[in-house]
Image (tube, grey):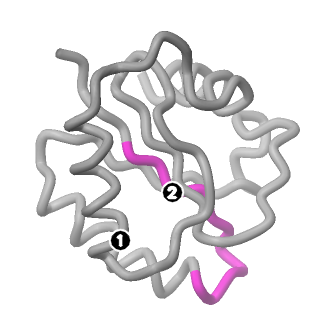
Protein backbone atom coordinates (compact mmCIF):
# COMPACT_ATOMS: atom_id res chain seq x y z
CA UNK A 1 0.00 0.00 0.00
CA UNK A 2 1.29 3.46 -0.89
CA UNK A 3 2.01 6.01 1.78
CA UNK A 4 -0.84 8.43 2.42
CA UNK A 5 -0.11 12.15 2.19
CA UNK A 6 -1.77 14.86 4.25
CA UNK A 7 -0.87 18.27 2.87
CA UNK A 8 -1.81 21.58 4.45
CA UNK A 9 -2.07 24.42 1.92
CA UNK A 10 -1.47 27.58 3.90
CA UNK A 11 0.27 30.94 3.87
CA UNK A 12 2.74 32.36 6.37
CA UNK A 13 0.84 35.66 6.59
CA UNK A 14 -2.33 33.82 7.71
CA UNK A 15 -2.85 33.85 11.48
CA UNK A 16 -5.13 30.82 11.33
CA UNK A 17 -2.42 28.91 9.48
CA UNK A 18 0.22 29.85 12.03
CA UNK A 19 -2.07 28.60 14.82
CA UNK A 20 -2.95 25.44 12.89
CA UNK A 21 0.68 24.49 12.35
CA UNK A 22 0.98 23.10 15.91
CA UNK A 23 -2.21 21.06 15.45
CA UNK A 24 -0.95 19.75 12.11
CA UNK A 25 2.42 18.71 13.55
CA UNK A 26 0.72 17.03 16.52
CA UNK A 27 -1.40 14.98 14.13
CA UNK A 28 1.73 14.04 12.20
CA UNK A 29 3.07 12.50 15.41
CA UNK A 30 -0.27 10.73 15.95
CA UNK A 31 -0.13 9.22 12.44
CA UNK A 32 3.55 8.33 11.90
CA UNK A 33 2.81 6.11 8.87
CA UNK A 34 1.34 9.05 6.95
CA UNK A 35 3.40 11.74 5.28
CA UNK A 36 2.44 15.22 6.48
CA UNK A 37 3.59 18.16 4.37
CA UNK A 38 3.21 21.89 4.98
CA UNK A 39 2.89 23.75 1.68
CA UNK A 40 3.05 27.54 1.69
CA UNK A 41 0.97 28.53 -1.33
CA UNK A 42 2.99 31.68 -1.90
CA UNK A 43 6.49 30.28 -1.40
CA UNK A 44 5.68 27.28 -3.58
CA UNK A 45 3.22 28.85 -5.99
CA UNK A 46 4.66 26.79 -8.85
CA UNK A 47 3.21 23.67 -7.21
CA UNK A 48 -0.25 25.08 -6.48
CA UNK A 49 -0.41 26.82 -9.85
CA UNK A 50 -3.96 27.97 -10.62
CA UNK A 51 -5.62 26.67 -7.44
CA UNK A 52 -7.45 29.54 -5.79
CA UNK A 53 -7.38 28.86 -2.04
CA UNK A 54 -10.34 30.69 -0.53
CA UNK A 55 -10.24 29.47 3.06
CA UNK A 56 -7.41 28.44 5.36
CA UNK A 57 -6.50 25.84 6.25
CA UNK A 58 -7.14 23.91 3.04
CA UNK A 59 -6.11 20.26 3.07
CA UNK A 60 -5.17 17.85 0.33
CA UNK A 61 -5.24 14.17 1.27
CA UNK A 62 -3.99 11.49 -1.11
CA UNK A 63 -3.65 7.75 -0.75
CA UNK A 64 -0.21 7.83 -2.35
CA UNK A 65 -1.60 7.46 -5.85
CA UNK A 66 -4.62 9.71 -6.06
CA UNK A 67 -6.24 12.60 -4.28
CA UNK A 68 -9.07 11.59 -2.00
CA UNK A 69 -9.88 15.05 -0.59
CA UNK A 70 -9.14 18.67 -1.41
CA UNK A 71 -10.88 21.44 0.46
CA UNK A 72 -11.04 23.69 3.50
CA UNK A 73 -11.27 22.10 6.90
CA UNK A 74 -12.12 23.56 10.27
CA UNK A 75 -9.04 23.78 12.51
CA UNK A 76 -9.80 21.37 15.40
CA UNK A 77 -7.46 18.36 15.28
CA UNK A 78 -10.28 15.87 15.70
CA UNK A 79 -11.90 17.06 12.45
CA UNK A 80 -8.81 16.13 10.44
CA UNK A 81 -8.33 12.92 12.41
CA UNK A 82 -11.89 11.79 11.63
CA UNK A 83 -11.46 12.66 7.96
CA UNK A 84 -8.22 10.68 7.73
CA UNK A 85 -9.83 7.65 9.40
CA UNK A 86 -12.90 7.84 7.15
CA UNK A 87 -10.87 8.15 3.95
CA UNK A 88 -8.57 5.27 4.87
CA UNK A 89 -11.57 3.03 5.59
CA UNK A 90 -13.10 3.66 2.15
CA UNK A 91 -12.08 1.73 -0.95
CA UNK A 92 -10.10 3.69 -3.51
CA UNK A 93 -12.34 5.43 -6.03
CA UNK A 94 -11.86 4.84 -9.74
CA UNK A 95 -10.80 8.45 -10.31
CA UNK A 96 -9.21 11.15 -8.13
CA UNK A 97 -11.60 13.28 -6.08
CA UNK A 98 -10.33 16.44 -7.77
CA UNK A 99 -8.49 16.73 -11.11
CA UNK A 100 -6.68 19.97 -10.23
CA UNK A 101 -5.83 18.52 -6.82
CA UNK A 102 -4.32 15.51 -8.59
CA UNK A 103 -2.10 17.78 -10.65
CA UNK A 104 -0.98 19.60 -7.50
CA UNK A 105 -0.28 16.30 -5.77
CA UNK A 106 1.83 15.08 -8.71
CA UNK A 107 3.88 18.29 -8.72
CA UNK A 108 4.33 18.09 -4.94
CA UNK A 109 5.47 14.47 -5.10
CA UNK A 110 8.07 15.41 -7.71
CA UNK A 111 9.24 18.45 -5.73
CA UNK A 112 9.57 16.51 -2.48
CA UNK A 113 10.97 13.26 -3.87
Tell me which residue sits at (47%, 21%) in the image.
66
Labels 1 & 2 near each other (Cβ < 8 A): no
The magenta-colored residue range is 6-16
Q: Is residue 73 above or below residue 107?
A: below
Please give the residue where the numbered disc 1 appears in the rendered image: 79
Tell me which residue sits at (87%, 38%) in the image.
50
Q: Quadrant of residue 77?
A: bottom left
Q: Quadrant of residue 43?
A: bottom right
Element under disc 1: helix
Left or right of residue 61, residue 60 in this image = right
Tell me which residue sits at (84%, 52%) in the image.
52
Element under disc 2: strand
Please give the residue where the numbered disc 2 appears in the rendered image: 8
Q: Position of residue 110 (x, y in %)?
A: 53, 19
Q: Is residue 98 above or below residue 78?
A: above
Left or right of residue 26, residue 11 in this image = right
Tell me which residue sits at (43%, 19%) in the image.
93
Q: CA distance from mark 1 to mark 2?
A: 14 Å
* Label 2 crowd (10 A; few <14 / some 14-19 / many >=20): many
Q: Position of residue 28 (x, y in %)?
A: 23, 58
Residue 8, magenta (yes or no): yes
Residue 89, magenta (yes or no): no
Q: Which quadrant of the rendered structure holds the N terminus?
A: top left
Q: Which mark is residue 59?
A: none
Task: Give the total of numbered labels.
Answer: 2
Q: Position of residue 83 (x, y in %)?
A: 34, 56
Q: Nearer the viewer, mark 1 or mark 2?
A: 1
Q: Is residue 21 above or below residue 94?
A: below
Amino acid sequence: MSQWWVVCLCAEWCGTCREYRAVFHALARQYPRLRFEWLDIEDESDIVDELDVQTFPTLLIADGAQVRFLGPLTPPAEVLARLIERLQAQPAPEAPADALGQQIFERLRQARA
